[in-house]
Image (cartoon, rainbow, N blue to C red):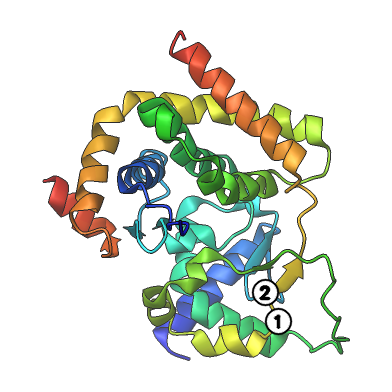
């Protein structure tokens, strides 16, 4: 039997990206655009992304929120592979090569991301539904706000 | 000098007075020295004037002769800020020429992307979520 292409779990991807969106908005990073296909991508406010180091903790929380939402809201389908890039980028943002020190820095940020996801489960679900309406469309922040009414 | 340039120069002078210096990285990214002295509003203003600031820095930074380094064999990925891949941003910044003329993007392997560290991190997340949910 020929191996079949694994089907993309769109709901999981949508929840993941929706959590990034909610984390970006709640932390003042702004939202530029979001999509779930061909691969999940959420862009925050362009100007805040220009300066390395600025809003570092907020950006780490933003990166962690996607995977955490998968674990919290749909743990049976949480996909580690999907979150590798996010975790790598979070670790890079924290910098340095001293692993114990990085873990010390990231632990409170994991807690913060968990609290954001838990406090905004309804919003994350609603944003995921908006993304799922047209999975191949890149939505602007304004599109998503409008769709949420 | 038009109004945008005037605003940009005023912004740079204001930042410099406080010890903040802007430099242009080879990746095409602006970098602050003493970035903690920059407010969110100022950072947003830098974003608005990004194209003008890049042009200004390029014009005022003496070119250094650089040797092209061959890519390392263990390079894992081409590191390009995700934002740059967004077409609308390129249009908004109106500065695609600056990005391309700056040339090389960084090719490197992150020492932090080790499997062990990632696995540890995933484990911590699982544990913290489970504890928080009382599982």
Q: Nearer the viewer, mark 1 or mark 2?
A: 1
Where residue B11 appears, as percent x and y from the top left, is 53, 69
Tell me the quarter of the image containing the N terminus of chain A.
Answer: bottom left
Mark 2 element type: loop
- Residue bearing the label numbered 1: B104
Left or right? Give the position of B6 relative to B54.
left
Taking the spot 50% from the left edge, 20% from the top edge, the residue there is: B129
- Residue bearing the label numbered 2: B27
Residue A38 drawn above or below residue B127: below
Taking the spot 61% from the left edge, 32% from the top edge, the residue there is: B122
Where residue A73 appears, as percent x and y from the top left, is 36, 28
Mark 1 touches mark 2? (CB < 8 Å)? yes
Q: Residue furthest top?
A: B134
Where residue B53 appears, as percent x and y from the top left, is 56, 78
Mark 1 element type: loop
Where residue A91 appears, as percent x and y from the top left, is 67, 44
Residue A42 drawn above or below residue B1: above
The 10 Å Cα crowd at callout 1, few under 14, some 14 to 19, many 20 or more, is few
Left or right? Give the position of A25 relative to A87.
left
The 10 Å Cα crowd at callout 2, few under 14, some 14 to 19, many 20 or more, is some
What chain does mark 1 sit on?
A: B
Dot 1 or dot 2: first in sequence order is 2
Q: Is residue A43 visible?
A: no
Q: Residue furthest left?
A: A149
């Amino acid at each position: 039997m020929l191996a079949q292409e694994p089907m993309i779990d769109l709901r999981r991807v949508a929840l993941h990206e929706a959590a990034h969106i909610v984390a970006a908005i709640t932390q003042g990073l702004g939202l530029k655009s979001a999509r779930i296909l061909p691969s999940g991508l959420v862009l925050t406010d362009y100007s805040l992304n220009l300066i390395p180091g600025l809003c570092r903790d907020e950006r780490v929380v933003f990166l962690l929120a996607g995977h955490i939402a998968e674990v919290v809201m749909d743990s049976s389908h949480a996909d580690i592979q999907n979150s590798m890039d996010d975790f790598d980028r979070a670790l890079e943002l924290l910098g340095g090569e001293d692993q114990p020190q990085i873990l010390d820095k990231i632990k409170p940020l994991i807690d913060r991301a968990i609290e954001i996801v838990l406090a905004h489960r309804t919003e994350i679900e609603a944003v995921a539904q908006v993304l799922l309406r047209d999975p191949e469309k890149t939505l602007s922040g304004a599109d998503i706000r409008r769709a949420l009414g | 000098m038009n109004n945008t340039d005037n605003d940009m120069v005023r912004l740079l002078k204001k930042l410099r007075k406080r010890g903040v210096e802007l430099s242009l990285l080879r990746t095409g990214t602006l970098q602050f020295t003493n970035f903690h002295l920059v407010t969110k509003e100022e950072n947003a203003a830098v974003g608005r004037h990004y194209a003008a600031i890049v042009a200004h820095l390029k014009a005022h930074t003496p070119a250094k002769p650089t040797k092209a380094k061959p890519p390392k064999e263990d390079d894992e990925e081409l590191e390009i800020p995700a934002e740059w891949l967004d077409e609308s941003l390129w249009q908004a910044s109106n500065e695609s020429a600056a990005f391309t003329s700056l040339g090389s993007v960084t090719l490197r392997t992150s020492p932090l992307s080790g499997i062990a560290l990632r696995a540890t991190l995933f484990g911590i997340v699982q544990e913290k979520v489970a504890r928080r949910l009382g599982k």
